[in-house]
């Protein structure tokens, strides 16, 4: 890891007292590069440092907020839309005002930008902020080492983002060899990036690159945003926009094409989102068929799947980035409502057809609860330490949930996996 000694500007605790300024770090990077994974790593490694998180999801269902809340209990979400579109910064300012309130006692704030946000807009807003308690803490640009070239081809503006960054994280280096890594480093340098470049797998960077850690003995516990809401939101206005994961009733699609004046050049202007929610379980086989046939332009899928009787214990986190696909079983929480929630993001995709395709995956009357029905899904699950081996559960048994998303290795591509016998179609 290079640049290990450097820290982003404004990082670390400032002198205590009324003028104490809290660094606000922007975590950016294209869709699926690993921002949430990195953020969760930072939160786990934060010691006694109190980290505030602002998540800016793109899509009606706040998958990222839910993914982060898996680590910290709850989080703040700016909801559907793109943070960079709060052009006057007033919405962001309102959040920062709450989070930097001295009674909240945060040491650092990390804004996880949507994968389609324009980092320069965020940086501009933070620099223009008149909040006396906040100071811009730097831009961390996360790059998917395996997808960088393809992404840059489609979005040459990524070079501009790299040039703006204060720290570049080459994530997913586990997916490329040394030669490709060398080429990637040359390409990053050639893009005019002057920032420190660190390599990482599963976002495992040293948290001290972003902020000074307090000894864990000082830890009071990760901030609960319920506490913030109680402390800061007593006036009754502040509840609006403060979200916990688990939204109801979102189903449909939103096009970002006509996203309002002034955003034509933004990455998200070219993308469309489908948000899908179902309370009937999904058929594993039909869902795999759907994923196998997903259109080229459908770049990102994320969310959680309920496979009903196929696995009563676990929901399955689903991540697809380009042709890369992974399922991660996670135990249902006590009393957690069984449902499927997915966000699909793509360019030039037929959103109505995608919604209809997902609708067809509903398992209204489960036909096939034999263990083989899950084999297709389990091929895309990998447990810590396993090589390419598929996980095949005992008859009627669920696979044990892995310890965490970032404990899993790379998964397989659908079209590489035709060898196993397929169970009969359900
Ligand atoms: N192989 C590999 N997979 C990774 C790594 N980091 C993250 N992933 C996986 O990549 C997928 C996307 O990760 P996220 O952290 O959700 O990405 P993101 O940038 O927050 O995604 P968006 O919010 O959609 O922009 C997940 O399946 C992660 O487990 C890594 O270093 N190596």
Image: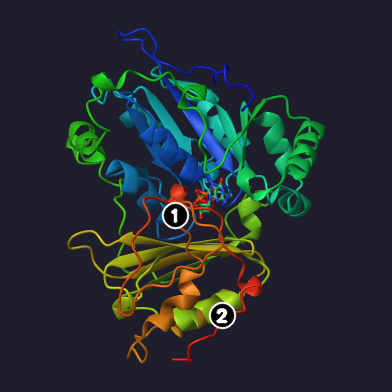
Q: Residue 148: which numbered mark, if any?
A: none
Residue 68 place in picture, x, y as percent: 38, 46
Q: Residue 80: which numbered mark, if any?
A: 1
Residue 144 appears left or right of 309: right
Residue 207 place in picture, x, y as percent: 46, 27
Earlier-in-chain disc, 1 versus 2: 1
Residue at 57% x, 16% y is 5
Q: Can the viewer see residue 421? A: yes
Residue at 52% x, 47% y is 114
Asked which secondary structure carries label 2, the reply is loop
Front residue (pair 117, 301): 301
Residue 219 appears left or right of 316: left
Residue at 29% x, 50% y is 244
- Rendered position, 297 above or below 375: above
| Real-space CA distance between mark 1 and mark 2, rounded to the nearest whole angstrom | 40 Å
Q: State which quarter of the image contains the C terminus.
A: bottom left
Residue tagged 2: 420
Crowding around mark 1 (Cα neighbors within 10 Å: few <14, some 14 to 19, many 20+) is some
């Amino acid at each position: 890891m290079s640049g290990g000694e450097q820290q982003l500007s404004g990082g670390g605790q400032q002198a205590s007292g009324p003028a104490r300024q809290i660094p606000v770090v922007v975590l950016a990077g294209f869709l699926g590069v690993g921002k949430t994974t990195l953020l969760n790593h930072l939160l786990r490694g934060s010691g006694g440092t109190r980290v505030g998180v602002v998540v800016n999801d793109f899509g009606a269902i706040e998958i990222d907020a839910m993914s982060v809340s898996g680590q910290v209990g709850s989080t703040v979400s700016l909801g559907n839309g793109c943070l960079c579109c709060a052009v006057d910064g007033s919405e962001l300012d309102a959040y920062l005002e709450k989070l930097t309130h001295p009674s909240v006692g945060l040491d650092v704030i990390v804004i996880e930008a949507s994968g389609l946000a324009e980092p320069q807009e965020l940086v501009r807003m933070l620099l223009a902020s008149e909040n006396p308690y906040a100071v811009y803490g730097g831009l961390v640009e996360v790059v998917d080492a395996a997808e960088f070239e393809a992404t840059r081809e489609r979005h040459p503006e990524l070079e501009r983002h790299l040039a703006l960054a204060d720290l570049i994280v080459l994530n997913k280096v586990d997916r490329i060899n040394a030669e490709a890594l060398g080429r990637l480093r040359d390409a990053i340098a050639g893009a005019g990036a002057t920032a420190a470049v660190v390599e990482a797998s599963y976002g495992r960077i040293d948290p001290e690159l972003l902020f000074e850690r307090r000894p864990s003995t000082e830890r009071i516990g990760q901030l609960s945003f319920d506490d913030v809401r109680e402390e800061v939101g007593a006036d009754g206005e502040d509840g609006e926009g403060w979200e916990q994961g688990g939204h109801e009733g979102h189903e449909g699609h939103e096009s970002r094409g006509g996203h309002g004046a002034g955003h034509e050049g933004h990455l998200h202007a070219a993308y469309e989102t489908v948000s899908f929610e179902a309370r009937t379980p999904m058929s594993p086989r039909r869902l795999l068929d759907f994923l196998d046939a997903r259109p080229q332009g459908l770049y990102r899928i994320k969310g959680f799947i309920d496979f009903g009787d196929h696995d009563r214990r676990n929901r399955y986190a689903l991540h697809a980035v380009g042709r890369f696909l992974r399922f991660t079983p996670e135990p249902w929480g006590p009393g957690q409502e069984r449902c499927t929630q997915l966000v699909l993001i793509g360019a030039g995709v037929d959103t109505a057809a995608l919604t209809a395709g997902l609708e067809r995956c509903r398992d209204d009357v489960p036909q096939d609860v034999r263990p083989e029905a899950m084999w297709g899904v389990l091929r895309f699950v990998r447990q810590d330490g396993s090589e390419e081996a598929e996980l095949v559960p005992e008859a009627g048994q669920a696979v044990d949930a892995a310890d965490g998303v970032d404990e899993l290795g790379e998964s397989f591509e659908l079209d590489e996996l035709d060898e196993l016998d397929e169970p009969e179609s359900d």
